[in-house]
Amino acid sequence: MADFSNRDRIVLSGLAFYGYHGVMLEENKLGQRFRIDLELGLDMSEAALTDEVESTISYAHVYDEVRDAFEEKRFKLIEALGHHIIVKLFARFERLDWIRIRVRKPEAPLPIVVGEAAIEMLRTRDQV
């Protein structure tokens, strides 16, 4: 896979949601907090030169799309949830070239004192 470390990106960190995703009965019944971090890769040259919001992607619209995808259905695996969000973002925003998503469960039902369970996925448009 290509190196994305030096490419333009929009970064949204720590988006907070409460949901009922998970394998365990308690997760489905009681729910839990989730955090989602996104890096959205796109060419921002035009936006930088024009200073026009139409030349980029609105952060508010990204948040709305993520929230809708998060609430649309329940998933057992956060891997499936992450993939679902990626598919929805690519469908909504044609400017996107790649997406990195991290889905975090700060209170995963694990015997850990501090920490969280998380997945991270990196996908280009042609991979979904």
Image: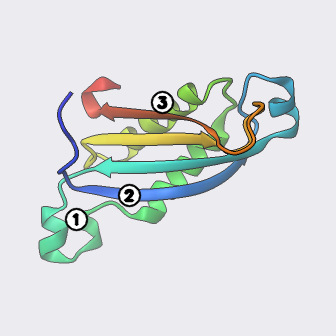
Mark 1 Cα shell of 10 Å, populated few (<14), some (14-19), many (≥20): some
What residue did someone put label 1 on? 55
Q: Nearer the viewer, mark 2 or mark 3?
A: 2
What residue did someone put label 2 on? 11
Amino acid carrying label 2: it is: Val
What residue did someone put label 3 on? 83
Q: Is residue 56 left or right of residue 32?
A: left
Identity of the residue furthest to the bottom in this view: 51
CA separation in Å, label 1 and label 2: 16 Å
CA separation in Å, label 2 and label 3: 18 Å
Image height check: is 113 above or below 17? above
- State the SS at label 1: helix
Q: Nearer the viewer, mark 1 or mark 3?
A: 3
Q: Is residue 26 left or right of residue 113?
A: right
Residue displayed at 59% across by 42% down: 104
Amino acid carrying label 3: it is: His
Q: Nearer the viewer, mark 1 or mark 2?
A: 2
Image height check: is 65 above or below 12? above
Q: Is residue 35 left or right of residue 49?
A: right
Mark 3 Cα shell of 10 Å, populated few (<14), some (14-19), many (≥20): some
Residue displayed at 87% across by 39% down: 30
Q: Is residue 122 left or right of residue 62?
A: left
- State the SS at label 2: strand
Q: Earlier in the sequence, mark 1 or mark 2?
A: 2
Mark 2 Cα shell of 10 Å, populated few (<14), some (14-19), many (≥20): few
> Residue 5: x and y, percent?
22, 46
CA separation in Å, label 1 and label 3: 26 Å
Q: Earlier in the sequence, mark 1 or mark 3?
A: 1
Q: Nearer the viewer, residue 18 or 95?
A: 18
Q: Earlier in the sequence, mark 2 or mark 3?
A: 2
Q: In which quadrant is the N terminus drawn?
A: top left
